[in-house]
Each structure stands twice: as C-alpha cells, then as structure tokens.
Image (cartoon, grey):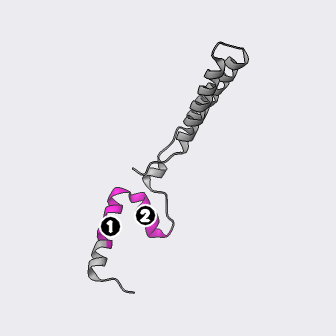
Amino acid sequence: MALGPEDERRLAELAEQIRAADPHFALGLGTGDPHPPAEYRKPRRTGLRVALALTGFALAVFLFATGTPGGGFLAAVGAVLALATVGDGFAHTGD
C-alpha cells in the first residue's frame, strides 16, 4: 500500500523532528542499527540506591536484633523504605 502525499509529508516532518531532538537515535535508525532513545541513555545511580537500601536494611535488622525499643517497627519501616528505594531505581517514567 503506497502512502499518499500527506502521509509522506507527515513522515518527513516526523523524521526531521527526531533528527533535531535526538541525532544519535535518528542515525541508528537510518543505518539499521538502532540505538536507545536519549531518555533511556541517561545514567542512573542504581549502585548508590542499592547501597543506601542495604545500609538502611542492615541498620533496621541490627536495631531489631539488639532489642531496641521500637526496633521491630523500625525494622519494618527500614525494609519498606529499602524496597521502595530499590524499586524506584528500576522505574521509568515516560516523560
């Protein structure tokens, strides 16, 4: 099925917008070797998030093990925060 002139014009505009917004991505598409879009190439601080989560979890377990008053509650809060921190590192927003 052939494209009409209006569709060809729209595709040309879209291609130009992509080339202007993300030349690396557009070049990859043009050569048949696609690269991830810019929003997926942003560096993430996943290592720092995991380190903070593990530190918080270890502290919560230590407080619980030593019998600190409210240690069970602190351990539960620490575990939830650790999971939320690590989970947030893998989330992606489509903004």
User: Which residue: 26% across, 78% down?
Assistant: 6
- 75 on left or right of 41: right
Residue that mark 1 sits on: 14
Q: Earlier in the sequence, mark 2 or mark 1?
A: 1
Is residue 20 visible in this depiction of the protein? Answer: yes
Q: Residue furthest bottom?
A: 1
Q: Image quadrant of residue 67?
A: top right
Residue corresponding to mark 2: 27
Q: Residue 55: horizontal and vertical position, in percent? A: 63, 26
Crowd rating for badge 1 (residues with CA inside 10 Å; few <14, some 14–19, many 20+): few
Please tell me whether residue 12 belongs to the stretch shown in magenta: yes
Residue bounds of the magenta highlight: 11-32
Check the image and report above or below for 84 versus 27.
above
Q: Is residue 51 left or right of residue 19?
A: right
Q: Nearer the viewer, residue 43 or 71?
A: 71
Asked if the stretch drawn in magenta spans residue 88, the answer is no
Where in the figure is residue 10, as x and y percent of width and height? 29, 72
Could you say whether the residue bearing mark 1 is in a helix, strand or loop?
Answer: helix
